[in-house]
Amino acid sequence: MTEGVELYSIWVYLSETPLLWLTATLVAYLIGDAIANHFGRHPAASAVLFAAIILVVVLVVTDTPYQTYFEGAQFVHFLLGPATVSLAVPLWRNRQAVKRNLLPMSVALVAGCVTAIISAVGIAWMLGAPPSVLASLSTKSVTSPIAMALTETIGGIPSLAAVAVMITGIFGSIVVTPLMNALRVKDYAARGFAAGVASHGVGTARAFQVSEEAGTFAGIAMGLNGALTSLIFLAIPAFL
């Protein structure tokens, strides 16, 4: 009985320690990555998906509020900002390829960005979702730091936006390879760009696993889509 009380006391102490949840996040990803590697990096074997499931199970079993987890793991969230800014590096390194494909990339970027916003908001609106949920879902196809900041600006729920972003990224990373194969799209630049526009960082990570060229263009697309989506939402109030 005494040992049980001591273990509980230790857990209460550790659960309030930021390092615990940061470590749990990293360990969960390492386990998820090992599982994905075991299945030969199959499109359906997403390391992020496995890691998310592991973390959800841990939080539910330990009855840990999300806010407590986030306070401990927010350093990972902080790093998303610099990681997003660093996307300027592949954009600059591949500027000549971008110049050569500027027109098709621009058309694909606008089409993908607008479609992502309208489809998410339209479906949710038809299902009767309230305005705060509509605002949260509208940023689902941009990377988390941009999505959460935009969502808060337009009256949405940042935490819900983060969930929508993660689900979008995981789904996109799973379907992008078989979908592109079915459509017979063989150009890795085009495949990567589509993955980056539709499923941001998770899709970009998947693109790098397939091809360095695909990953590079996915990173470029993710950065450009984040910028264009921000401009669209900043411009909307001027027309209202």
Image (spheres, rainbow, N blue to C red):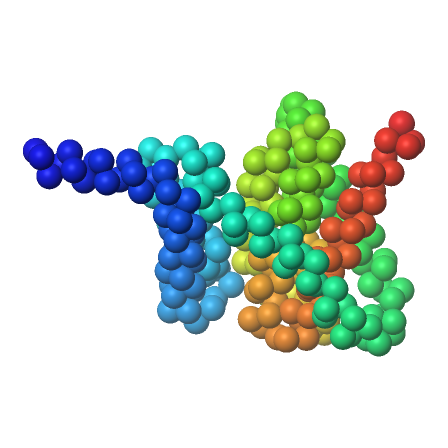
Residue 114, position as x, y percentages in the image? 79, 45
- Image quarter of the N terminus: top left
Residue 125, position as x, y percentages in the image? 69, 28
Q: In this view, does 178 lie to the left or right of 6?
A: right
Q: In this view, does 183 lie to the left or right of 160?
A: right
- Image quarter of the C terminus: top right
Q: In this view, does 168 lie to the left or right of 37?
A: right
Asked where in the image residue 129 lies, by quadrant, the reply is: top right
Residue 39, position as x, y percentages in the image? 40, 68
Compared to residue 124, the image places residue 25 above or below, namely below
Q: How many labels does the image show?
A: 0
Residue at 46% across, 53% down? 49
Q: Is residue 135 left or right of residue 97?
A: left
Residue at 76% across, 68% down? 91
Viewer-proximal residue among 76 and 169: 76
- Looking at the image, the residue that sits furthest to the left is 1
Does the image show residue 199?
no
Asked where in the image residue 36 lies, by quadrant, the reply is: bottom left
Does the image show residue 217?
yes
- Looking at the image, the residue that sits furthest to the right is 239
Residue at 47% across, 34% down? 67
Compared to residue 204, the image places residue 148 above or below, namely above
Asked where in the image residue 124 lies, by quadrant, the reply is: top right
Viewer-proximal residue among 93 and 97: 93
Viewer-proximal residue among 219 and 121: 219
Residue 175, position as x, y percentages in the image? 58, 58
Compared to residue 226, the image places residue 122 above or below, namely above
